[in-house]
Amino acid sequence: MTTHPTVSASGLTLRYGGTAALDDVSFRLHEGVTGLLGPNGAGKTTLLRVLATAVPADRGAFTVLGHDPGTVNGRREVRRRLGYLPQTPGFHADFTAFAFVDYVAILKELTDRAARHREVRRVLEAVDLSDVRGKRIKRLSGGMRQRVALAAALLGDPDLLLLDEPTVGLDPEQRMRFREVIAEAGQGRTVLLSTHQTEDVAMLCRRVIVMAHGRVRFEGTPAELTARAAGRVWSSAERDPQARAGWRTGLGAFRNVGDPPKDAELLEPTLEDGYLLVLDGEPVEVASA
Amino acid sequence: MSDDKHDGIGWHADADDLRAYARGELEAPRLWSVDAHLIACAPCRLALAEAGDPLALDAGWARLDAELDAPRPGVVEALLTRIGVADHTARLLAATPVLRASWLSAVLLVLAMTVASVYTADSPWLFLALASLLPLAGVALSYGPVLDPTYEMALVAPLHGFRLLMIRTVAVLVTSLGLNGLATLALPEYGLRALAWLLPALALTTTGLALTARLGPVLAPALVSGGWVALLVVTRATTHGTLVPFTAAGQGVAAAIAVVAAVSLHRLRDRFDGSPSPSSITDFAHRSAS
Ligand SMILES: Nc1ncnc2c1ncn2[C@@H]1O[C@H](COP(=O)(O)OP(=O)(O)OP(=O)(O)O)[C@@H](O)[C@H]1O
Ligand SMILES: [Mg+2]
């Protein structure tokens, strides 16, 4: 890509006791939505928290639009350009949705009351919460709270949006709605979206990063990830013992990924197949960006 | 449209207020009452149209539109803005856990019990010991990941962490010292001696905060409180009469400690904004929670 990266990170390492939550993680993020896939404990949340300046890395460094969060001033500049949706966002449950988002807006230095309130209304509208803005957060459903937190992340039109599993706990209709909001946010902005849903990636993302055990296992486009499984997905009546992974599909047959036997009935690969293959076995070499 | 100043609504906005409003210069809470009034009162809207220049008026309408559905602030917030606190500061304070009614009533209860104990035991030392400690407890509980559910959100926001800490600390201190003061009024026979908690309270609070920059928001206040209790227990076992911290010399030492701690707290202010070193307080919640 010719544009300057929004984020460039090199050698990020963070250990919690014996486990390396991040192990020499390097990558660049450009405009558009980048998906972050990985199994539980892969280090996705840790990576997002480091990028959000909530926790410093033990080693390595990163910049956001050229600002270095290792310095006091750089960190403030990074924070000014940041929208962060934590995996388990906290709330002041007695606040109304409006008051809570307003509170976050104040933390984001929007002190002019009229302009701030306009901005709060805009983001609440964007996540479809205008109708319940006067309700106390403790009376909102889990999915609505998730949307309140997303609204707070969208405040001030940040250049970099870090979203940690934003589609968890949403009903299918809301999930689609969320994807629209995220896709829209990805226009002219950089979004890093951690998720367990390969559909999120297939539908939204220009690029995808796969992590496991704190390391980057794959970085490339969704099509490239899917292509990893080309010729490596086949169907069989029973689970093929040779397969790296296999599961019974709705049609009754087994879908296997791995190294197929000679006469196997090959299937069209999906992103999920590519993801499973990338996770399996030895670290896969990183595709060049 | 009539100029009648007393129709069904009962009052009309002051002409000066309307002009200030049109210029966007009217301050809360007066701003809110004019806002609310304009929504209900057509004559005043017309008067407003005449009061301001068209450009400012547009901005005024846009604002009014936004105000229409911005919820009213809560009791605490309304009170704070009434006494002159900026509305954004008031909202930050309303998000401070210890400024909630539940905490304040707990403090009142504790104070009432210790005041009662002064009467039954005929000695003020339990009251003085507790009144010295309560402000630190309040400040410690208004900061940090344990009681602030939005701690991480606040941490990664550009507003400087130290500024947020100071806004909350001042509010909690004022409240806490005020409650202590009220309790002191219930002990008139001890005279000024009943105020001997004030300097130790300031010393304990500033020391607790200064150490928080190094030790984190749980360990630091715990150590300082523990040290205070230990000091009192030891001096009580070894001395008769007034406990050392409440003597004139003790008060002088407390004042000196408060000043030194305040200076070092100011020096360490950037520590409250997320430090580049991994052992900083910023990650305390996560490291200690697992
Ligand atoms: N605060 C912490 N203290 C100790 N260990 C931690 C902490 N946070 C994360 N870890 C460890 O770091 C590793 C990565 O965790 P992380 O939360 O980043 O994973 P994740 O990819 O977000 O997982 P999930 O999909 O379940 O959200 C895990 O082994 C986890 O146990
Ligand atoms: Mg996670």
Image: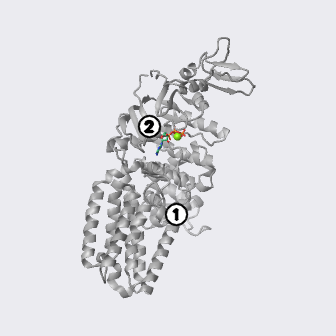
Please give the chain letter of the residue carrying mark 1: B
Please give the chain letter of the residue carrying mark 2: A
- Disc 1 residue type (three-letter): Ser
Q: Position of residue B227 (x, y in %)?
A: 34, 67
Choose between B56 and B242: the one closer to the eye: B242
Q: Which residue is mark 1?
A: B33
Q: Residue at x 42, y 78 (%)?
A: B182
Q: Position of residue A87 (x, y in %)?
A: 53, 43
Which dot marks residue B164?
Answer: none
Q: Residues within 10 Å of mark 1 (few under 14, many from 20)?
A: few
Choose between B160 and B59: the one closer to the eye: B160
- Residue A6 visible within the image: no
Task: Locate the N terminus of chain B and report the quarter of the image it occupies.
Answer: bottom right
Q: Residue at x 39, y 68 (%)?
A: B135
Secondary structure found at label 1 = helix
The verdict on label 2 being within 8 Å of ligand 1 is yes
Q: Position of residue A189 (x, y in %)?
A: 47, 33
Secondary structure found at label 2 = strand
Q: Residues within 10 Å of mark 2 (few under 14, many from 20)?
A: some
Instruction: Please identify the quarter of the rendering in which residue B276 is found.
Output: top left
Instruction: Please identify the quarter of the rendering in which residue B140 is found.
Output: bottom left
- Residue B70 visible within the image: yes
Instruction: Please identify the quarter of the rendering in which residue B128 is found.
Output: bottom left
Which dot marks residue A20?
Answer: 2
CA separation, marks 2 and 1? 57 Å
- Disc 2 residue type (three-letter): Ala
Q: Position of residue A256 (x, y in %)?
A: 65, 22
Query: What coloring was used for the rendering?
Result: one colour
Q: Residue at x 33, y 54 (%)?
A: B214
